[in-house]
Image (cartoon, rainbow, N blue to C red):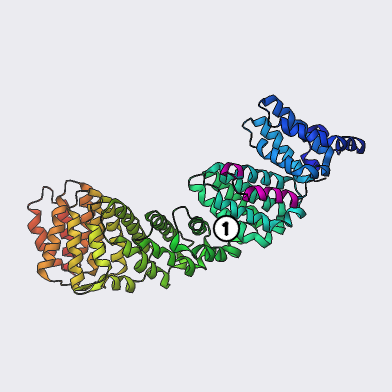
Amino acid sequence: AGAARHYPSAFKGQRPCKGSRRLVRGCLEQLMPLLLTELCDWSVTTRTKAAATLCNVLVYAERSVKAHAEKLLAGLARAAMDDEQTVSQHAQACVRLAGAFVPADLALSIVDNNVRGAGHTAGGKRSWSALMATLLEGAGQDEVGALVVPLTDMVRDLELSLPDAQDHQVQILRLVRGVVTGAGPKAQPVQRSLFASLLRLQGLGEEMEALGAAAQQTIEELGTVLGYGGTSGLYEAEIGNVLSEAVQGASSWRRDSQELRIFNVALRHGHAAVCAHASLWVPVFALAADHNKDADVRSVLLVLLDFVLQDSALRPALVHTAHGAALLVEAVVPVCVWRAGKVASALRKGGVCCLRALLRHKLVSADTVAQQLGQGFTPGPLTPVLKSCLDDDDAQIRFITCQAMVHLFELVEGRLDQEMVRIMYLELLKRLDDSNDSIRIHAAQAFTAFLPSVPRGYEAGQFDYIVRGLAIHLDDQNPEVQEGVLPALLAAGSVNPTQVINVLEECRTKHRSTAYCDRAIAHARELASM
């Protein structure tokens, strides 16, 4: 009954009569060599007819083909990869029938010898892995279930020996999918290995979108046949073990490391299931700060970290825990330290993106950030990093840093001492004179967030410098800059409204338009009258 679903349409799903089966079996010794020879003929017509005839012969011969299994499978491995589509389609139909009639353990032994055999090229291994995947489509669940361990061993061998090209990797996916669908619940003993292989294949989806989507679908099928209800249940059951195995060799990862791909996909698609295992994956991001590591690996980790920090499903693992502080201190701040070169600049850009996300979502405490900033004349590691990034040659780094400063000042409001206030206002005033208007606008926003940390009655000379540095931009040629600076001057009124009024009344006489000065003065007078 299992083989009947693979019969050619002419049989209408009916098994041939006993007499016809006996007749073909009697001629099998002469038929098989002739058909296999014609499968290799130079003529497409001959190969097509041979493949179609062989398909019919297999229906009659049934399990008698066992005696010819090795030569049969070798011929079909070549024919199934034929450039002519009609030949390959007939050959694949033959392979499915062979899967139903050749004992699965014998077929696996033949394929395994050719996959692992010395001297076989990547193309040859691809053909044999494709053959095994198609054989599984014809085999019964009990047969496949009994062989899940050696089949997954074969998958692991192919992962190490085949290149990452799509035409090779798709055959590995077909083989894994054949185990999943063929074994069904009997795949439980190797579910972790199958899951890890599928995560790796899904990780290739960045370069091969169709492969990644198919791998993701197969993960869903694996979770369903094993009784987990789909992908989420499978993640909850196995992601901890998979991550633990993946991160063991993290220090030696390369861009194309299988474990890095698994780690990347697990965090991007694991969602809540990954949160419980933050102690496994958070320390890995410290590798991004190691300047001796492969720059490609560091780049991948920084892009992944930025994703993690933006993911609402993963952020709970970092909020109100030591993990957020660990990421800031051990990964993000060291990456943002200035180093020469384009590679270092690209990594620094990734680092400030992560810093912005950490601060925006308040994944680190105000105490931790204040400690990293330092106190008095003893700056912490974060202060020189912020200064260098605000003055970076790359406009995008300056822009992102200004955005990060907005969130930083909101987080540490009221915690800056006078020396830190002096350092910060000097750096922000520099950025108000930036050549890029977008940076100037965001620097003004940072100033607005910064001013509540300036103590009331702040030293008059320095505060005069702050107000004058802001006031000059109320007459800027760009209206967006004027609109951006106005809230900062309104916030300055809370520090010393009288001084703000005096400075602005002097400045307004030099402005082309006094509208913004008048609004700021009116607000300061209102505060002064309270």
Front position in the image: 454 or 7: 7
Q: Is residue 344 left or right of residue 430?
A: right
> Residue 274's spot in the image, x, y percent?
52, 64
Residue 335: quarter of image: bottom left
Front position in the image: 59 or 71: 71
**Residue found farthest to the front:** 119
User: In which quadrant will I find the N terminus?
Assistant: top right
Front position in the image: 220 or 284: 284
Inspect this view and state whether residue 459 appears. yes
> Residue 292's spot in the image, x, y percent?
35, 61
Q: Residue at x 47, y 67 (%)?
A: 317
Q: Which residues are magenta?
A: 104-124
Residue underneath mark 1: 196
Q: Residue at x 53, y 66 (%)?
A: 244
> Residue 308's spot in the image, x, y percent?
44, 60
In the rendered image of this protein, does residue 166 appear above or below residue 155?
above
In the rendered image of this protein, does residue 17 appear above or below residue 517?
above
> Residue 60's spot in the image, x, y percent?
84, 37
Tag 1: residue type?
A: Ala
Q: Secondary structure at mark 1?
A: helix
Q: Within 10 angstroms of label 1, few (less than 14), some, or many (20 or more) residues? A: many
In the rendered image of this protein, does residue 344 appear above or below residue 8?
below
